[in-house]
Image (cartoon, rainbow, N blue to C red):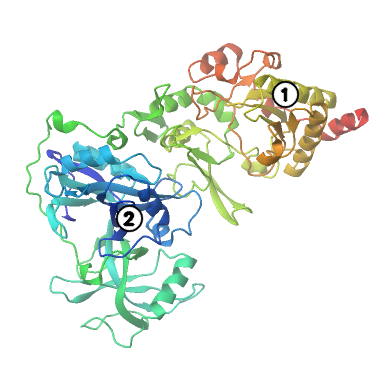
Amino acid sequence: MLAKPGGKAFDDPEWLFEIKWDGYRAVSELKKGKVKLYSRNGVSFEKKYTEVLAALQQLKHSMVLDGEIVVLDATAQPSFQFLQHYPDVPDDCSLIYYIFDILSFEGKTLQDEPLLTRKKKLESVLPKNSIIRYCEHVVGDGNKFFKWVLDHDLEGMIAKKADSLYHTNKRSSEWLKIKNHNITETIICGFTAARGARNYFGSLILGIYNDKGILQYAGHVGTGFSDQTLKELYLKMKKLKTAKSPFQTKVKVNDVVTWIKPVLICNIKYTEWTRDKQLRHPVFMGLRIDKKPSEVKEEKKQPMETKVKKTPTKSATKKAVVTAAKEIKAVKSGKIEVKLTNQDKIYFPKDKLTKGDVANYYQSVQAYILPYLRDRPESLKRNPNGIDDKGFFHKDAGEGAPDWVKSILLYSESANKDIDYILCNDKATLMYLNNLGCIEINPWNSRIQKVDKPDYMIIDIDPSDKNTFAQVIQTAQVVKKVLDKAGATSYCKTSGATGLHVYVPMRAKYDYDQVKDFAHLVSMMVQEELPEFTTLERPLNKRKNRIYIDYLQNRKGQTLACAYSLRPVEGASVSAPLEWKEVKKGLKPSQFTIHNILKRIQAKGDLFEGVLGKGINLNDCLKKLMNQK
């Protein structure tokens, strides 16, 4: 079943609203352990999206399901280009099959059942899965939901009549697509020669079929291509070269055109159609493999026949928790206002703490945590689905951030590319990170002013499951003893999970290698004193249930949860600075939580501020240690 173009968003209790995903429409047939997965025009997706196929094979029932295959990038935004190039995408991308309809169950057709009945059945039989997801909806509140779509910069929303039946291969006015971004499908009809530094080709000549089935010129596009896309697309077009233009009328183009057979379909983002029916400000988004060229026609918006009802009935206004997105929390910083979406979403199920609780906590301690974040590149650890989801790291977050969020472009040797790191310099950015799903905050050890010189050294005391916390405490005490012998001031904090972190101020006077070497020396001396249950072996299989004394945290780009950071663990514990006299028997990391840390700070002050104070004299410390060996 297909949707017609709709007009503006509307409220109506007889309609429901879903996200319009920027992906490939996909039908899956499950029967006795066998699965078929294909596009709306019958193209198999089974080899291209093997993870989806494997996830479907785990489902127990015989069903026919309808949905959309999507790739979410590191910011949890759908990326059509990543979908097209899957699996050759960054590691922090996620492949998702959002299922929004069920057409049959255990051999019985459901197409003649009302949509809400079908969706209720679908939700009841679809298990939770990291790849297979039920597509949530809201009922009645189309305007509010569309505002949420706009704020999250999604492609648009689909409005569906709640009692609509499923009509195969029919484009129905009971399903309407209401767009945020103007994205249309066009046919590639030719290309111009490459100019300047660009390789392969300059721009694509685009076409679209009119109501009479005649291919019409729709303009040309020369932006939106990566080097990889240019090469891949050129190799495809090269095989389709033809001497004759596919257009019936002559096309005015300012360059020599190589014509190709009109079989390749692409998505184009644009601002509007001009009077002469050409795309204004087009941007190439990616190739489509799930449609036929004959389907690529100019869309005309469907006039609304429903009467808008501003006050939906109570039964019709029940909303899906995940996508209803109540925006009633905001932080202002000067002219900047940051809104928190989905603040009622549960992040800590057993503790009954929400996304809003997390944001409120960070705003309550922002005066204390920001000194440890300012001007430091952030490697975002995001848990947008709460602590029951392992989450993912998102380093390259600056490009997709609002203009007012500061960032810095730094080359990463491990990734072999420039990465745009966010800098969390104010309370507005802190709220922005929380809104992305950052439960914990992970800054670099150095600031952008001296990016190669860390402000502190870290010894990370990381226990295995077999170690007791008493052993962790003993290790921290020996670390302090060694540092005291060196004349190095040190500070301790809980990791917020199972370990302890010991910091030594460096004041950005030494480079990472110098600091790492000093940390290595200290760690070796500690391990020599506690050989029974500590190790310097990093691989898990070599630790043999011993505490790992991690000195390798002192490398450029490494991060740890900073002081006062929440951790995504049951109990909502916090990485809490300690007085050394507290590092003794009876100490438990779980005793410092979201509920009591602010009161502790108010009573004791910031116990960690010395970490950013006067740095040690590394030469003097080394001499003292070597004299004692």
In percent of width and height, residue 455 lies at: 69, 35
Instruction: Give 546 or 9, whichever is nearer the viewer.
Output: 546
**420 relative position to 110: left or right:** right
Residue bearing mark 1: 476
Inspect the image, locate mark 2, and give the three-letter code of the amino acid beneath it: Val
Residue at left 20%, top 31%? 318
In percent of width and height, residue 290 lies at: 29, 64
In percent of width and height, residue 411 lies at: 61, 53
Report helix, strand or loop for mark 1.
Answer: helix
In percent of width and height, residue 376 lies at: 59, 39
Number of numbered discs present? 2
Q: Is residue 270 visible?
A: no
Disc 2 to disc 1, C-alpha distance: 54 Å
Viewport quadrant of the C terminus: top right
Inspect the image, locate mark 1, and give the three-letter code of the amino acid beneath it: Ala
Residue at left 41%, top 72%? 233
Going from N to C along the chain, the mark reached first, 2 or 1, is 2
Label 2: how many Cα within 10 Å (few below 14, some 14–19, many 20+): some
Residue at left 31%, top 28%? 328
Label 1: how many Cα within 10 Å (few below 14, some 14–19, many 20+): many
Viewport quadrant of the N terminus: bottom left
Residue 214 lies, with reference to residue 550, above or below; the image says: below
Residue bearing mark 2: 35
**Residue ranking furthest to the top:** 603
Q: Is residue 405 visible?
A: yes
**453 relative position to 603: left or right:** right
